[in-house]
Image (tube, coloured by chain):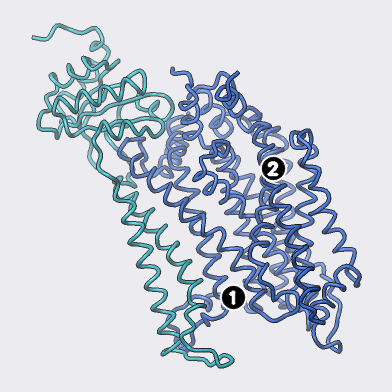
Chain colours: A blue, B cyan
Amino acid sequence: MSSEDRARTDLLPANASYESVSEQVSSIVLKKPTPRSWKFSFLIGLLMLQALLLGIGWLFAYGVGIWGINIPIGWGLAIVNFVWWIGIGHAGTLISAILLLLHQEWRTSINRIAEAMTLFAVACAGLFPLLHLGRPKLFYWLIPYPATTDMWPQFRSPLIWDFFAITTYATVSLIFWYLGMLPDLATMRDRAQSHFIARIYGVLALGWRNSARHWHHYQKLYLLLAGLATPLVVSVHTTVSWDFSVGIVSAWHSTVFPPYFVGGAIFSGFAMVLLITIPLRRVYDVKDLITETHLDKMAKIMLASGMTVSYGYLMDAYQAWYLNEPYDSYIYTNRFSGPYDYCYWALILCNCVIPQALWFPAVRRSTLFLFGISLCIQVGMWLERFIIITLSLHRDHLPSDWAMYYPTIWDWALLVGTGGLFLILMLLFLRLLPSISMSEMRELVHQKGGSNP
Amino acid sequence: MIPPDPRLSSTAAASEAHESGPLFGLLAQFSSDTELIEATHTLYADGYRALDAFSPFPLEDLSDALHLRRSLVAPIVLGGGILGGISIYALEYWVNLFAYPLNVGGRPLHSWVSFIPPAFECIILLGALAGAGGMLLLCGLPRLNHPVFEVEAFRRASTDAWFLCVQSEDAQFDSEMTRQSLLNAGAQEVWDVPAIEA
């Protein structure tokens, strides 16, 4: 068996044809009945979404005082959740843009799902800074526009850089995702049985007709967008890390922040892609399109980025020791032996110890283990942000200021609620749009010498 | 007189229906990507220029067969990026030095280092937006309908069928002659594409 043959059997079913891959993906939306597990998950998602509505409603009525934040801990769960969600989004762009430029064929069947995940995670993330503003209705003050107040945003502040980074990321991700879907929306239009549904997909496909002239421009643009998205994805979490490292708060003021924030983002993002694709393979029976090889490769990237994150923790601690600066050293000692030490050791367990199991090929190919490890990583990455934000703030330079931070039910409501929002959006996407790129799958069949009709 | 071709019979009814109306062109189906590329080469060599080919995924050889010129998408993206970068930097400069000068810890008003992150983001943003708009514009999209959709078999073009369309605006176009050229080039079936109101 040559390596070429093996690649074909690993990434595609043995008898894959243009028709079979198109049918397998489009029938999920057009023909198959909605699975029970989908309906059940949707119900759970709706219930969780109520927590978001309630949490936001209560916040609008009473203000940020309902949260656990105080002085000195002005950045509580809202910012923890923001950084966590935005990090999750990063794997989507990595899969769709960077792996495209590196000619990694295995990205083909998971890129659409990952891109959708990015969009929805950014949507969840974007809520938090706005809600944290205190006066959310004035969010548009972030936009530089000629206001009658004659005031302008401060371009020397990382917070405005963040605003630019997040809006650009959301917009470019949307363009990349939607344009990537154009040919597939055309396929959906042509395969729809009812005239009405064909019209909906027809409008969404913007009149795409698979002309060589279309493909000619489209291919070029898709590559260029991948080229633009690659530095963008690195810049987004770098900018997020500048929100911390440009300040002088102890243990925030560190140059290792940008690379290890980006590493952590990829780490949690791939964990989220696995959390989505593992149940998807089961429910929609696409195990031959999203194969064990795909899971294996994602697990490897997760392991590599996990090592980057562990290195970041080590370097962070080393810096604090090497600088011999009392405040930084204190914050570090406080991390692993202070009042929140259980968070720190849980973080080490979830992010550094448990992912080591991914060295074993058997673990990388076991969906159960992968699912469990991915869940641990999500918890670990959330704790990482909690530790960075809360622990540096709660014991700052003035001991008379020291305080503890305990999130209230309203803090948790927003975390649970955005989880619901993410779940609902993801489920609607899986139900209504082609979740695997059919045109790229056909191209893959073609490259592997697939069957002609 | 061209001898009657059995493959033409199925389309006879269809062509009759549109006989009164003007034609947009002729649409021919081929059995594989290689045959479509070959036929495109043949028709191009015959002097046809108003050609369009359709395939369910991008084929570089097909673009070559149609002699498509380098796509203008790249310069459009570059233009958008340059516009975005220059305009946001100009805005930052004007805001910080003239419209709303603020002394923050004695740092210079023109802190160019901190102007770079927004400028970088806007280069990407405007580049991507210009690229998306430019690509659609170059493709003549979005549009709600197109004559080729009038042919029922064209539905398969987005799954596993290969089509070549010769448009009637071509100087050489002659309904019968062109049909014969397409059949000679290996077409499985040829349809009349009626012109529709845009």
Label 1 residue SS: helix
Where A106 sits versus A351, above or below? above
Same chain shared by disc 1 and disc 2 = yes
Q: Is residue A249 left or right of residue A174?
A: right
Residue lying farthest to the left in this orientation: B1
Residue displayed at 78% across by 63% down: A314
Question: Is residue A237 or residue A32 the one in the foreground?
Answer: A237
Q: Position of residue A370 (x, y in %)?
A: 76, 40
Q: Is residue B41 left or right of residue A387?
A: left
- Separation (CA) of disc 1 from disc 2: 34 Å
**Numbered label attached to residue A282:** none
**Numbered label attached to residue A300:** 2
Where B14 sits versus A25, above or below? above
Where A33 sits versus A185, above or below? above
Residue displayed at 17% across by 33% down: B49
Q: Position of residue B132 (x, y in %)?
A: 39, 53
Identity of the amino acid at label 2? Lys
Q: Position of residue A127 (x, y in %)?
A: 63, 65
Identity of the amino acid at label 1? Leu
- Discs 1, 2 touching: Cβ within 8 Å: no
Q: Closer to the observer: label 1 or label 2?
A: 2
Where A279 sits versus B163, above or below? below
- Residue labelled with disc 1: A159
